[in-house]
Image (spheres, rainbow, N blue to C red):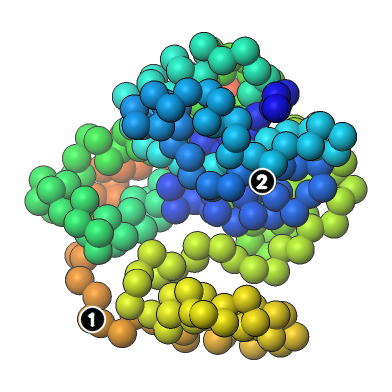
Amino acid sequence: MTVNKIGIIIGVQKGGTSSLFKYLSQHPQVSECKIKETDFFLKDSKWTQGFEYYEDLWEWDPKKHLVALEASPNYTVSFNAVTTTIQRIQTIDREFKFIYILRDPIQKIESMRVQGTYHGWYSPLLAKETLDNVPLEVIESVRYATIADKFTQSFSKDSLLLLKTDGLNRKNSPELLMNEACRFLDIDSSFKFNLETIHNARNSYRKDTAWKFLTEAKYAEYLRNVWKIFPTSLKENARTFLKKPFNKQKVVPPLTKEQKEFIRDALKDEVRKLELEYELNLASWNL
């Protein structure tokens, strides 16, 4: 089996990659990866298994599929991760398309701090914070323009699509964002997506919730079918309630005003480049 074109959602973490992946996977011309986050081009344990292993992650049908899709936001978690990912992709003789969906940097960092503290990996970074700054490696993960440049310089500007997370918000007509993604991937943009479900939303990483229990229960598939009959507004309220953790969450101090100013100041040039060179309207980010 030979996969001709591979589309990769390269980031950002906590930026809507799960929802975008699930939405695009509905398209009949898209082959959905069996593993959403393969991390194939980043993790040595995956890379050493060879490209045949990677291709086998799709049930590729050349008669109907035009693009194989995966989503690995870890590819852009740091400059080192970006470099490793790009160098390895360049050794593969296939056409690649990259979608980089961006979230307001301050919101992204706030979300990362909470989830990372729960899992434990952010605790060392939290210890390095002061009341008026955050560690440089945290800032590095939201230097979107610099990371975008690394991809466009290594491949081409036409190989990268930048989107904004708030474009998936129902108030902002997510159909427009999906149409843009379809045109970029060269698939039928008239396809009607079901954009009702928000995937991997707040607290989805918690294991101590009723939602986690129900989605992993023995009769989960039956429950999903029953769930579909309820109106959207009722499902949203129920989802919010069911995703509340049973246990008391670790309290992560919110970013201080000074820390936010530190982030804004560090990203001035990044924001300017995204607006001028990548033509993104970032007014909603309040930067």
Q: Secondary structure at mark 2?
A: strand
- Is any atom of residue 195 visible in this view? yes
Residue nearest the observer in this picture, 217 or 186: 217
Q: Residue at x 64, y 39 (%)?
A: 58
Residue 248, disc: 1
Horizontal and vertical percent position of residue 210:
42, 84
In the picture of the structure, the residue carrying the numbered disc 2 is 32
Q: How many marks?
A: 2
Compared with residue 175, is residue 159 higher up or lower down, i.e. above or below? Answer: above
Q: Amino acid at mark 1?
A: Lys
Q: Amino acid at mark 2?
A: Glu
Q: Residue at x 81, y 32 (%)?
A: 62
Q: Quadrant of the C terminus?
A: top left
- Is any atom of residue 284 visible in this view? no
Horizontal and vertical percent position of residue 220:
57, 78
Q: Is residue 113 left or right of residue 47?
A: left
Q: Residue at x 51, y 36 (%)?
A: 10
Give the image quarter of residue 84: top left
Q: Is residue 198 left or right of residue 76?
A: right
- Label 1 neighbourhood size at 10 Å, few (<14), some (14-19), many (20+)? few
Q: Quadrant of the N terminus?
A: top right
Disc 2 vs disc 1: which is toward the camera?
2
Horizontal and vertical percent position of residue 13:
43, 47
Residue 196, disc: none
Q: Residue at x 40, y 70 (%)?
A: 203
Q: Earlier in the sequence, mark 2 or mark 1?
A: 2
- Label 2 neighbourhood size at 10 Å, few (<14), some (14-19), many (20+)? many
Asked if the residue at tag 1 contacts the one at tag 2, i.e. Cβ–Cβ closer than 8 Å, the answer is no
Q: Secondary structure at mark 1?
A: loop
Give the image quarter of residue 81: top left
Horizontal and vertical percent position of residue 206:
35, 70
